[in-house]
Amino acid sequence: MRLPLLLTCLVLLASCQSESLQDGDRLYRTGRFIEALAAYQAAEGSDPDLDLKIAQTRYRIVAEEARQQIHLDHPQEALGYLDVADQLLPNMALTAELRQRAARELAVQFTRRGQALFEQEKPAEALALFSLAVEWDPSNESAVEWEARARHRAQLEFDLGERLYFLGLQELRSGNELRARTAFMHSASHWGKQSRAGELLERLSAEVAAESQRLGELYLRLGMPGPAWLALREADRLKPGDAVVQGQLAAVEAELTARKHLTDADIFIRGGRIDEARFHVQEAMNLAGESIEGEAVILTEALKMKFNEQRYILGLACELDNQVVRAHQLYGSILVEIGDPDYEDVPRRYRELAERIEKAEVAYQQAIEARQSGDQETYRIKLAETLRHAGDYKDAAERFKSLPPQEDPQP
């Protein structure tokens, strides 16, 4: 009983493996290589050519991925897949064909990149890319043509750089360092920063930067921040990143900005805009402190004088309007800040207004007492007397306005 059952199982197994092999062949023919590989691997040992079929299928999977990368304009990645394909099955015609296609695409890409660099006035870099394009695809006529153009332009650039370099050497021997530096700068733009012209340019730039820095420091000692800024800016341009120069430049810029604030403050003082003037004086002090202290002190005094001038004018206006208490306060503030000498009549006015306030105080107290005793007429009279002495004394005006109208006497 067991032998027939074993024979049956073997027959069924052989049948399944045969079906897997047939499925693999069918899938392979229709280009479904990954599924075909799975079918072949499931049919192990059933066909003497099975190992070759598996190897071919693996090869086709990798080759198709390379083909896909070429379609996606990724020829470099495609070449990587083709290297793997060569290891799986060497010397395949499909590999050679795909390599040619990838090489042609690479040549096209290198040519495009070279054209972009050529348009950016970089013929040497462009020449390197055009040469790569020709190396990958010698039949690419566009790459060959552009390579020749770039080579010619690069040679012209080199020749021009050489002429400028020798011109710079002549200027240097003549002691014209600035003109020599200009010549080396233009030469380095053609030869590159790593060239001999670039080295001489760097050396001369450092020397001229040091001289500009010394000139800027001299201007600073002479109290000339404008020319100092120009000299230090030149030093910073010639030797970027120097911490000392940048620190000096920042200090000079802060002083120039502070002086601009002082100029604005002076304009606002002349226009009587005290708050704006005070703001600009404070900003100047915050920026440059000691370097503009003298000018700031002068403007602060002018600001104080202008402010007290406004107080004085307002005080006179308040006197005319019988706002005695307000005028007295304004005159008092003037006396506290600048004393007697600047406004000779302020002490007199201050004393006279103080006397009027005292009289207003007496009359006001009498009015309050009269009201408390029920003497409405005296209350009215004393409030009126208070207002004659000082129209803004305490709440006398409000109290007087709240009184009922006075009846006219009977004829």
Image: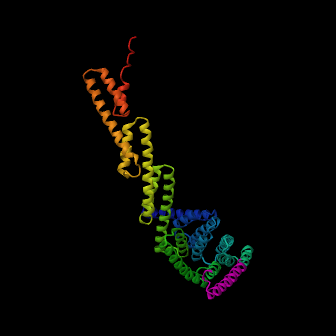
Task: Return the residue nearer the eye: 322 or 97.
Answer: 322
Q: Quadrant of residue 390?
A: top left
Q: Is residue 56 visible?
A: no
- Tell me which secondary structure the magenta stretch mostly adopts: helix
- Position of residue 348 relative to residue 85, above or below, is above
Is 7 positioned to the left or the right of 24 in the image? left
Residue 169 among magenta residues? yes
Which residue occupies 66% across, 86% down? 166
The residue lying furthest to the bottom in this view is: 173
Please give the range of residues in magenta. Answer: 150-178
Is 280 positioned to the left or the right of 114 in the image? left
Task: Return the residue nearer the eye: 142 or 182.
Answer: 182
Q: Position of residue 60 (x, y in %)?
A: 60, 69
Task: Return the residue nearer the eye: 103 or 231.
Answer: 231
Q: Is residue 402 visible?
A: yes
Residue 140 among magenta residues? no
Q: Position of residue 354 (x, y in %)?
A: 33, 40
Is 285 positioned to the left or the right of 126 in the image? left
Q: Quadrant of residue 205?
A: bottom right
- Position of residue 335 relative to residue 281, above or below, is above
Q: Position of residue 120 (x, y in %)?
A: 66, 71
- Position of residue 292 relative to residue 126, above or below, is above
The residue lying furthest to the left in this view is: 373
Q: How many marks?
A: 0
